[in-house]
Image: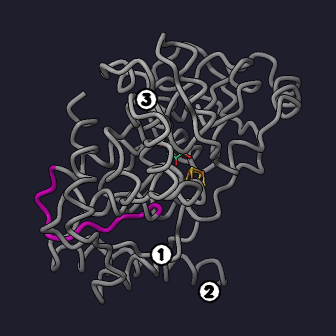
Amino acid sequence: MTCNEKTILGIEKLKERIAQLKKERNAVILAHNYQIPEVQDIADFTGDSLELARKAADQEADVIVFCGVDFMAETAAILSPDKTVLLPAKEANCPMAEMITAGELRVLKERFPEAAVVCYVNTTAEVKAESDICCTSSNALKVVQSLDADQVIFVPDRNLGSYVARFTEKKIMPWEGFCFVHDRIKPEDVKKAQNLHPEAELLVHPECRAEVIDMADHVASTSQMIEHVCRSRKKEFIIGTETGILHRMKKDCPEKLCYPLSSQAICSNMKRTDLMKVYSSLQDLNPRVSVPSDIADRACLSIRRMLEV
Ligand code: 13P
Ligand code: SF4
């Protein structure tokens, strides 16, 4: 037996055990589109932040295994406080979510008392608790337009905030946060990719810089990108987001050719979850994610408001 065959056998056994434990625990596995292929393949549902929040909100299972980063599992715990929410990779965090604290947001609110506060879902529970409404990359403009206020404090992503500002009359005041994966994609990367694939359509995530967004054919959340690729009559696409998404594109629309805009666009935090960690978390029902009820109750309002928009 070759080493490769042994590994495959190991992976297959692990998958069987995960499936068995999942039944025993009455668990569901939710995975973000950036997860490694093996994790995406064992998930009951793979999606973008909004889809995953919706799944977490109306879950029948007793246990939610969240394969993603901390703010996503926290959102699930806030929406389903009676469930056990597991984050298999305890250390998987989102650096952008750490770029604003609840204290900093309170100072901003005092400076602009007339402004509404929109927080990207990539925030801590404490920041969500200080916000009027939450948003994701797929609904940010809709959320902003749903507000009565003319001024909006938008935290923490400056790129998403500036992108939304293009389409609204409201005054958007973006915080200076950013995603290191998307923010480092440069116009030169776009030119290089377009030289290699001149027929391809360019899709980018709104966490990208304005100069990159200006060059795109479409700006979309991760799941919106997958949907667009599958539906489009075009054959080739350059994908301007984290490269984990390419696995789903290959699976959902194998006839299309999708190229990464940058092979460096890898979120190390999203890659911390593997099959072994999923298995151990189901076995031990740990690491658990919970949010203190005083914060969770207030954060829940801003998430629920978003889900209603
Ligand atoms: P989506 O909601 O588009 O999946 O994005 C989440 C994220 O973390 C992007 O970096
Ligand atoms: Fe956070 Fe960026 Fe990773 Fe998404 S890709 S989880 S925004 S660091």
Residue 67 percent across, percent down from the top left:
42, 64
- Find disc 3 in the rendering and name its residue: 140
Between the C-alphas of marks 3 and 2, the distance is 52 Å
Q: Residues within 10 Å of mark 3 (few under 14, many from 20)?
A: many
Foreground of the two, 140 or 240: 140
Q: Residues within 10 Å of mark 2 (few under 14, many from 20)?
A: few
Q: Is mark 3 within 8 Å of ligand 1?
A: no
Q: How many marks?
A: 3
Q: Is residue 114 left or right of residue 173?
A: left
Image quarter of the N terminus: bottom right
The kind of residue on which mark 3 rests is Ala
The kind of residue on which mark 1 rests is Ala
Q: Is residue 128 left or right of residue 197?
A: left
> Which residue is depicted at the point 63% across and 40% down?
241
Residue 39 percent across, percent down from the top left:
46, 64
Determine which quarter of the picture holds residue 255. Answer: top right
Residue 264 percent across, percent down from the top left:
77, 51
Which callout, 3 or 1, points to the residue nearer the camera? 3
Image quarter of the C terminus: top left
In terms of sequence position, does the residue under pointer 3 or pointer 1 come before the other? 1
- Find disc 1 in the rendering and name its residue: 89
Q: Is mark 1 within 8 Å of ligand 2?
A: no
Q: Residues within 10 Å of mark 1 (few under 14, many from 20)?
A: many
SS under mark 2 = loop
Foreground of the two, 142 or 253: 142
SS under mark 1 = loop
In terms of sequence position, does the residue under pointer 1 or pointer 2 come before the other? 2
> Which residue is depicted at the point 49% across and 83% down?
10
Q: Which mark is residue 1?
A: 2
Q: Is residue 190 left or right of residue 12?
A: right
Between the C-alphas of marks 1 and 2, the distance is 31 Å
Residue 62, magenta (yes or no): yes
